Amino acid sequence: MHAKTIAELGVGLRSGEFSSEELTRAFLGRIEHLDTRLNSFITITAEQALEQARSADRRIRDGEQGPLMGVPIAHKDIFCTLGVRTSCGSKMLDNFIAPYNATIVEKCHSAGAVMLGKTNMDEFAMGSSNETSYYGPVINPWDQNAVPGGSSGGSAAAVAACLVPAATGTDTGGSIRQPAALCGISGLKPTYGRVSRWGMIAFASSLDQAGPFARSAEDCALLLGVMAGFDERDSTSVERPVPDYRATLNDPVDGLKIGLPKEYFGEGLDAAVAKVIEEAIAEYRRLGAEVSEISLPNTPLAIPAYYVVAPAECSSNLARYDGVRYGYRCADPENLLDLYSRTRGEGFGAEVKRRIMVGTYALSTGYYDAYYLKAQQVRRLIRDDFAKAFAKVDVIMGPTSPTVAFNLGEKIDDPVTMYLSDSYTIAVNLAGLPGMSVPAGFVGNRPVGLQLIGDYFTEAQLLNMAHRYQQVTDWHRRIAPGF
Amino acid sequence: MSLGPVEVRKIAHLARLAISEGDIPGYVHTLSSILHLVEQLNGVDTTAVEPMAHPLDMPQRLRSDEVTETDQRELFQSIAPQAEAGLYLVPKVIE
């Protein structure tokens, strides 16, 4: 049962083959037995889950339908959940019980999804390995020495290990696509504004976007269909109808034009990963797609621009954690300055402090034009590269990550080296485009992800292309030994 | 651009982050390496390029100026480190 997709579980639930309560108990049991090996959950909400499951069972009996009705899911611990600790992977929010639900949490509840718990993540979503979490690193189900990627490492590992059929994540610089790739599952980062950010703890507001993790493109379509949509409480939410992502999954892909950016296949790309990606592209050729080389010349500037924009926005967003209204407060503050400084010094981990300081520096008097303004100009150049490319091709493809999962501890002491693992994902966030990662093979025992990048609001096309690929390959069906 | 201990202490103060003296050299090293990475932007000609504030170049949506939220002070203060009589308590600011 645990290896079934949401689409398959839905059939079983509707036909009465099993109840949501049975399903929920089965997955909770797997989490209890197997997550000691992975550390993918920060909080398990067993009691609420069983209540939600029984409610879903009643709704199914009453004839209510919907793709997520009675299906267990997990939320990244960045989404506020009413009455449930929402830690964001930080000591700062270790005691924070959210007083409201994030919009996407509410939407999933309404759709009848059963929340099993909150998944582990890099602290405040800042990291590419899940090693900056206050709750300890997550282990990659495929290899106990490997990181799962980050920042949504817990969601990716939990789905990969079949502890839950699907999970939510967020992607500010690759935090859905990179862990999806490294854990061998499917993950989609929607167009900026497609999914509400309300109740999602902010890191870099002009880049943050929530999206689904699942073991197939079809399941991503089902979860995205529930998550997406206009929300008046998010001022950057886009007022635009949500298409039926499932309806177009089987559309033919022959004649579609795929562009391969030469910058994504150059220096820095592991040769074995390149080989896997080339084989995946060959599969698309066999499906009738036309493949051509394109250029995104400003690609090398994406990481430098990101490490101005993201820290600047982070330093502003994280100013709210001051030990006054909620969250951690240091013991025995001498005065107000001491309260602020020690609360923040003790409550934040090293990587968060680094980014706050970089951002503070970049925004400080006399440096704004040289850093933030310059980075925002370069951001436009990067976006214009994509605009030119999409005048010629329908979708851009390449590797999601330059290497397979690296070893735990390998990069954590060298932030700049860690940052480079997001070389192929970050430009997509700067441009606000949708991107997806699907499993495309292995190097040794570690998975490789194929990245698909689309023009604005072409999530349906990305899902369609991913689904067609998954009809002729079975990489997405592989499950890590022992799970 | 490299930072020294003096600059790092100043930035930490601006950001209201208490950093122990023993951690300063580590931050001097990592912050300098990040700023070095970011310096690649200096070589780019961005004359006449409009800064991009929003990926979709959308203007900020405005809503009408009406009360939309109800008073939930008690709920919100129930998770505060220290609150009393509807007020958040902090160390004395005025002697």
Image (tube, coloured by chain):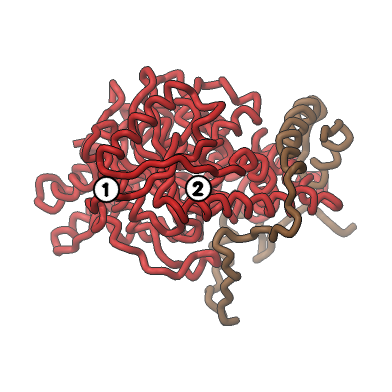
Chain colours: A red, B brown
Q: What residue is at 17 percent from the left and 58 percent from the top?
A: A60
Viewer-nearest of discs 1 and 2: 1
Disc number at residue A51? none
Report if residue A294 is visible in the image: yes
Residue A347, by quadrant, is top right
Quadrant housing the C terminus of chain A: top left
Q: What residue is at 25 percent from the left and 41 percent from the top?
A: A287
Considering only order in the chain, which callout, 2 or 1, is on the residue closer to the N terminus? 2
Q: Mark 2 points at which residue?
A: A78
Report if residue A116 is visible in the image: no
Q: Position of residue B21 (x, y in %)?
A: 82, 28
Q: Position of residue A77 (x, y in %)?
A: 47, 45
Q: A145 and A53: which one is in front?
A: A145
Q: What amino acid is labelled 1 in the image? A: Asp
Q: What residue is at 19 percent from the left and 45 percent from the top?
A: A9
How far apart in space, not on screen, are marks 1 and 2 (Cα)? 39 Å
Q: What amino acid is labelled 2 in the image? A: Ile
Badge 1 element: loop
* B80 lies above or below A308: below
Q: Name the residue under label 1.
A: A254
